[in-house]
Amino acid sequence: MAHLRIGSRGSQLALWQANHISALLRERGHEVEIEIIKTTGDKITDVALAKVGTKGMFTKEIEEALAEGRVDLAVHSLKDLPTQLPPGFELAAVTTRVNPRDVFLSLKYDSIQTLAHGARVGTSSLRRQAQLKSARPDLVIHPLRGNVDTRVRKLEEGEYDAIILAAAGLTRLGKTQWVKEVLSESFMCPAAGQGALGIEIREGDAAMSEHLAFLNDPVARAATTCERALLNKLGGGCQVPIGAFADMNNGRLELTAIVARPDGSEVLREQQSGDDPVDLGEKVGETLLKRGATGILEQVYGAAAAAPQQP
């Protein structure tokens, strides 16, 4: 069996993910170690991510370690991974997906609908902000950065009336005590790839590909490939107001996607079905562009100083 080195960010959630994959590999008889790598996104903690616009801000340094042979594989939250990997890398596996939806957390309110007028809600995601403001224009959105622990602590300390986070991260860390509402994809369309892990390796590393093949979930791979194809078609990264949720229904993929103005004044929504993940993602992306997504995204990229080509 092989000696495998995993590259991972150092946050509690990233290490949970790396240790989860490590345990599965050890069950197969491999010897595994984890190397913690600090990424650009980890270093920039005082600016809303949407204003940074750095390509691969949570992956670049890990890919450098992969290219140099310091690690053999990288474990990412798939939603952080650019839709087009740099030359020299490939996605070896997409793991079985946990709940891809967002959740509403609050100490004193049971749902978004019951929030007081002008309530203070924490999120640094333009995607979440836009959909929240569309439903409740009166809410006051404030930036919320930091790892899951930090965000939950800020809620507990009363900095926010409520916060919105991904269900997956909270479930993995057992931090669900303040979750009051799971938000349906029709109300809050999730980020492309949310809830799945992506395992990245050096391109053409056949031995590594073989070691990791058992981790790949074909259904999760098809759904996330579809979502990422849509994101790629729209030229968007993980910090723009684009949502994508693909699900398998009766053997066919159904993709729901949104593009929204950050202030919630306009939300374009499109839903289509198809058999080919990439074709369906691109088709829905093209439909949204024709319906006016171009103008919305140009305005967002313009506001972000330098347009992020990919995350």
Image (cartoon, rainbow, N blue to C red):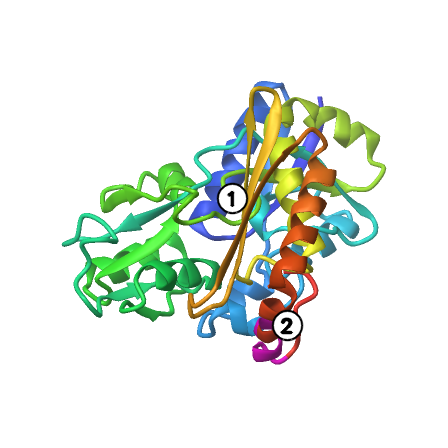
Q: Secondary structure at mark 1?
A: loop
Q: Amino acid at mark 1?
A: Gln
* Magenta stretch, residue numbers: 300-305
Is residue 82 at least partly visible in the picture?
no
Q: Earlier in the sequence, mark 1 or mark 2?
A: 1
Q: Nearer the viewer, residue 111 or 49?
A: 111
Q: How many dots with numbers?
A: 2
Is residue 88 at least partly visible in the picture?
yes
The vertical placement of 233 against 262, above or below, is above
**Which of the image's four quarters has the C terminus?**
bottom right
Q: Is residue 61 left or right of residue 38?
A: right
Residue pointed to by mark 2: 298
Residue at point 61% right, 67% down?
Answer: 297
Residue at point 18% right, 48% down?
Answer: 110
Image coordinates for residue 230, horizontal then vertical, percent = 66, 48
Residue pointed to by mark 1: 194
Q: Amino acid at mark 2?
A: Glu
